[in-house]
Amino acid sequence: QVRLAESGGDSVQAGGSLKLACATSGPFYSSACIAWFRQAPGKAREGVATVYFAVDHTYYADSVKGRFTISRDRATNTVYLQMDNLKPEDTGMYYCAAIPVGSYGYICLSESALDQGGYNHWGQGTQVTVSS
């Protein structure tokens, strides 16, 4: 059973930065698609970034492109989300999620990868609050 644990959430001013971490434990699928999602109060959960763990290829939602960077550390099986130039609309609970995709990494690198319905492992979330 794969387990995911997010950390790094905090309260910051607009324009600030945060780095979230998603630590994995248990059997880990080196060819997994790992994604970061967020959910603001009263809104649907939305995908913001994905990484195909095997080769570190990434995909971003338009709303965060150029401001967020997803990366992975193969030594520790940890996925990070560096968030720069934060805006109040980035406020929400941030979750990491995973699904094994084997050699079909292209699945992880398209708009469909930002759909939460495809993921079968989820963390508990970490809160990010950006004030203006």
Image (cartoon, rainbow, N blue to C red):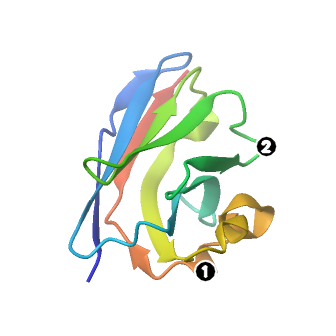
Is residue 70 depicted above or below 1 in this figure? Answer: above
Of all residues shown, which one is farthest toward the left? 26
Q: Classify mark 2: helix, strand or loop.
A: loop
Q: Quadrant of residue 112?
A: bottom right
Q: Is residue 78 left or right of residue 65?
A: left
* Amino acid found under the numbered disc labelled 1: Gly
Q: Is residue 56 left or right of residue 97?
A: right
| Label 1 packing within 10 angstroms: few (<14), some (14-19), many (20+) | few
Q: Position of residue 104 (x, y in %)?
A: 66, 74
Residue sitting at x 33%, y 34%: 10
Q: Is residue 24 left or right of residue 131?
A: left
Q: Is residue 33 left or right of residue 79?
A: right
Q: Position of residue 72 (x, y in %)?
A: 43, 45
Is residue 19 depicted above or below 72 in this figure? Answer: above
Q: Which residue is mark 2?
A: 62
Residue sitting at x 58%, y 39%: 90
